[in-house]
Amino acid sequence: MLRAIRHLIRLRRDDRGSPAIEFGLAAPVLVTIVVGTMEFGMLMFVDILMESALRDAARWGITGQLPNGQSRMAYIVDLIDERTLGLVDMSEANIQVLTYPAYDLVGKGESFVDGNGNGAYDAGETYTDTNGNGAWDQDMGVSGAGNADSVVVYRITYDWPLLTPIAGAFIGHDGKYRLRAAIAVKNEPWD
């Protein structure tokens, strides 16, 4: 018994190998912090690229220029693709460019006569087809970069694939994090 106590005292005073054990306990926390920092850094970087790309696309779009050999919309998408440095997959991104007559109508639905008084549009109720697509819409915006003096909203939504499952446990959904950017501008009077 006395021998066992002496052995425990000697073992307690022996600090050889303790750095390896301490590192083994601290390493998972350190790795998680480093990986999380890189993941959030990439998210912020791509988010800033998307916002900057929309700003540049809108700055070009307000001028009414017509590119050689392609439509205005195709040029806008190409410009966004170029400005996001290939980090945003344009085939997966949702890019919307909608035109409105005025800023206060952005995101508003087409007007309708509420026949049954329930406060919502129901099939068969009379409506004003503002965007001319033959159906009532919750958003009256017309697809396209608009004409002179049009208010244009540029939006992009992209599901960024998270690089690590560690970050996916805390943010995002199904291994992806949704990034969004939008800008509203008024086209110049180029007519």
Image (tube, helix red, strand yellow):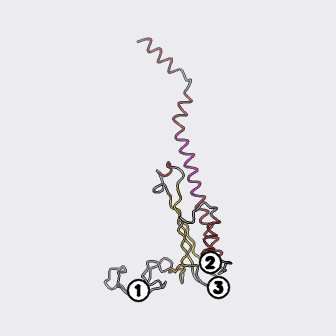
Q: Residue 189 has which mark?
A: 3
Q: Amino acid at mark 1?
A: Tyr
Q: Residues within 10 Å of mark 1 (few under 14, many from 20)?
A: some
Which mark is first along the chain, 2 or 1?
2
Q: Position of residue 123 (x, y in %)?
A: 35, 82
Q: Residue 127 has which mark?
A: 1
Q: Secondary structure at mark 1?
A: loop
Q: Residue 72 has which mark?
A: 2
Q: Position of residue 47 (x, y in %)?
A: 58, 61
Q: Residue at x 56, y 47 (%)?
A: 35
Q: Residue at x 50, y 50 (%)?
A: 167
Q: Position of residue 37 (x, y in %)?
A: 57, 49
- 174 with respect to 155 (left or right): left
**Tag count:** 3
Which mark is first along the chain, 3 or 1?
1
Q: Residue 153 has which mark?
A: none
Cβ atoms at labels 1 and 3 below 8 Å apart: no
